[in-house]
Amino acid sequence: MPETVIDVSNLVKSYSDLRAVDGISFSIKRGEVFSLLGPNGAGKTTTVEILEGVRNRTSGDVRVLNEDPEKSRTLTFKLGILPQDFSFIYNSTPKEALTFYKHTLRASGDIQEILEMVELGDKATTPFQKLSGGQKQKLGLALSLVNDPEVLFLDEPTSGLDPRARRNIWNVIKTLKERGKSILLTTHYLEEAELLADRVAIMNKGKIIDSGTPMEIVERHHEDDNLIIRGDGQVERDLAAGGFQFQRDGSYIKLRLKNIRDATSIINYLSEHKTKFEDFTLKRESLEDVFIRMVGEIEEDETE
Amino acid sequence: MKLSRVSAYFSLHARSYLRSRSALFFQIAFPIILILLFGAIFSGSSYSPSTLVIQNESPSTVSWGVVDAINSSGLFKVQLIPQNENLSNYITTNSVQAALLIPSNFTSNLYSGGLGFVVLKGHTNPTVATADYETLNGILTQINFRASNTTQKLVLSSQVAIGNTGKTIDYYVPGLIGFTVLSTMFNMVYTVPNYRRERLFRQLSFSGLTKSEWITANMLFSFLMLVLSDVILVAIGIYAFGASLTLNAETILTSALIIFGGLFFFTSVGILAGLVSDNEETVSVVGNLVMFPMMFLSGVFFPLTFAPAYLVTISKFLPLTYFINSLISVLDYGNISTVAIQIVWLLLGSAILFAIAVKLFSWKQK
């Protein structure tokens, strides 16, 4: 069984009468990508900053690589951290920044190789203030890799980036995953978590409201799946004759499925009756659909 | 330009600004402090007599009469020194600004119908020297009139040294070096809140750098910059304006030590001031609030000889006063031994303040 690299138990962070993190518990295994999801103000960044050791907790127990980040002086050397809203000294260049980190973290990594990995090789000597938003973020990621860390904290690594830059960072994260790194990823992009994370935890108002693999969460919370068929009146008539419930929406016919396997029966039925249709799509709820409903339901419950 | 847009932004800015209570407080407090400061210096509401050392080498009724007249004028605090004291040495070792010598032939000259010469000596800046001369001359003229009503019998001559060569620049060079040391404080007053706002401390903490290391690195850089700028400053003073400073290995090393101590002190003050500056509006106001009183009350730009007594007292509590006085003693007089203890105290105070600043300064997110 893989070793636990991060263990959080009943973690609480309070600011006077506000509980930003309200008794959460989770653990991350070595080589796992674990994603914290949640709306703004859910407590994701506070949680991550407590794990990084830059913020003190109110109560609870936190272990990162078997050390308490609040007390450890050596943990920084084993971690790679890309914080939210990454910023650096305005006039320093990526090469200077990485050289500085290499010295202070007593690392042996090849700076040029790291810059190339994040596609920043041609910007090595460009001052930070002249880098684009995506390039700045890439520099932050590069800095988190200088010491070849065992555990990485990536707090919204692709926030505000264009699709191409986002995909580039995803590729870097996939490479890191292949190399066996343990990664705690927070993100607003559910698609990102679905693609990269082995497990996710959904946070809202300081609490974890569910956790598991993306598939497990979708399974637990999804509503009916839909089969969308594009076809004419004959398709409608044959479906009605077969006793199927459906709705017409423009050129599409939508059928709600109690079970995803029902889609096969419907398509087989139409084929047996030689009903002609143009194409069909199986529309399954994504993690994002489930997430929005879960968070929305909580908001509505509290309003009531 | 649309006034509606101007008005909209005015409203936005005003609301944002007024929401910061600290900025509002300093915005109001700072002008009040300035007017109190300058009003006190220049209003002349009270007068603080400066010390006048008198050596009477010709004790007689007449010479003691002159001493009494000076003393009773209330314009000087008279301090008598023995006849056998070497006045020139006394002036140097005690950094005396004004000393009056009543020479040994003073009484005999007057009794033989001649003129009674007295000599104003000392080591000060031109403003003080001129004022002391004029004040003493006025007192002597009154004595003359009381004695004869017509003829001028008592004559004052001046041998006051201003720096080594009598140039104003000699006084200002150490003062300006003190000012460059003081200005390093501003680096921290601005950097600390800016780095906190930009979350650069957090980022630096991920590099394994500690706060003490960050402060030390900043200080070393500032020290190098200071040495560079002060070398240029001294060179311009000497070669462009003919300043005459006592420069040898001992005075240069002692000056470097004073500058380093000052850097320690003012960096620490800057960090502490930066810690209370929680937003952009407050930063410059806090910086000015800390810097300007020291700049004006420690004698960087003008002497406080004629300032009210309480301001002189306040200046004695300002560390910059001691840094500048130490630099003046070392660079103008070559006088290290008399300020040695003062320098040790300054370094000790700087180390304590530095330790407090490092302790209170946290990289953790609030």
Image (cartoon, coloured by chain):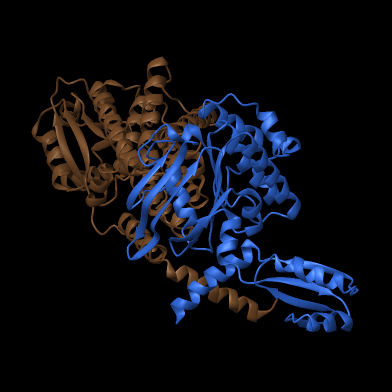
Chain colours: A blue, B brown
Residue located 44% across and 45% down the image: A51
In the rendered image, residue B150, in percent from the top left (x then y), is placed at 24, 46
Is residue A54 visible in this depiction of the protein? no
Residue positioned most to the top: B249
Q: Is residue A88 above or below residue A281?
A: above
Q: Is residue A102 above or below residue A211?
A: above
Residue B255: name its quadrant.
Answer: top left
In the rendered image, residue A53, in percent from the top left (x then y), is placed at 42, 43
Quarter of the image containing the C terminus of chain A? bottom left
- Along the horizontal axis of the image, is B327 left or right of B78? right
Is residue B8 visible in this depiction of the protein? yes
A13 or A257: nearer the viewer: A257
Residue B125: name its quadrant.
Answer: top left
In the rendered image, residue B305, in percent from the top left (x then y), is placed at 29, 44
Residue positioned most to the front: A272
Residue located 76% across and 36% down the image: A122
